[in-house]
Image (cartoon, grey):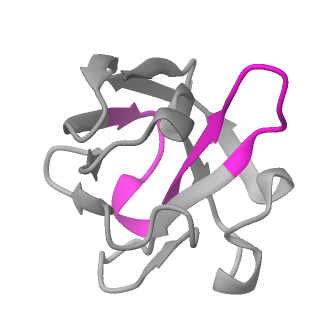
Amino acid sequence: QVQLVESGGGLVQAGGSLRLSCTVSGLTFSTTTMGWFRQAPGKEREFVAAISSSGTITLYADSVKGRFTISRDNVQNTVYLQMNSLKLEDTGVYYCAATYSPITQWTTRGSYAYWGQGTQVTVSS
């Protein structure tokens, strides 16, 4: 059974930082591309970042480029999202997800086969 478990969400002031973690079990993590998505209230779930199985290729949404960093530890079967300079508009539920699709499909929600339950991030003014 595949499980993706996110942690690290919480309440933070604008300009602050958070690091999200997602620990994966039930699949061969080292051969799986991982991604982070988020969903704000009343909005569609949107792509945030993705990282290749080896960690050598990363992709970011324009809205988080330069502020967020995705990384992974293939020994710990964990993917991270370091979020700096947080803004009010970064508020939402953050989900990690696993995909076997090529990089051209990494930003597409439907390309991901497995999802975590999400962790809430709230940025306050």
- Coordinates of residue 83 in the picture (x, y in percent): 29, 47
The answer to whether residue 8 is visible is no
Number of marks present in the image shown: 0
Q: Quadrant of the N terminus?
A: top right
Q: Is residue 102 left or right of residue 57?
A: right
Q: Which residue is found at the position 20% from the left and 36% from the top?
A: 16
Relative image position of residue 28 (x, y in whole percent): 42, 53
Q: Is residue 63 above or below residue 14?
A: below
- Residue 96 showing in the rendered view: yes
In this rendering, the answer to whether 85 lies above or below 16 is: below
Residue 60 forms part of the magenta stretch: no
Give how far across and how far down residue 37 sits, in percent.
Answer: 60, 45
* Nearer to me, 80 or 52: 80
Give residue 57's quadrant in the image: bottom left
Residue name at image x 50 percent, y 65 percent = 50
Is residue 19 found left or right of 31 in the rendered image?
A: left
| Range covered by the magenta-colored residues | 22-46
x, y (%) of residue 96? 51, 40
Quarter of the view holding residue 45? top right
Residue found at x 41% / y 23%? 5
Q: Identify the image quadrant of the C terminus.
A: top left
Question: Residue farthest to the front?
Answer: 125
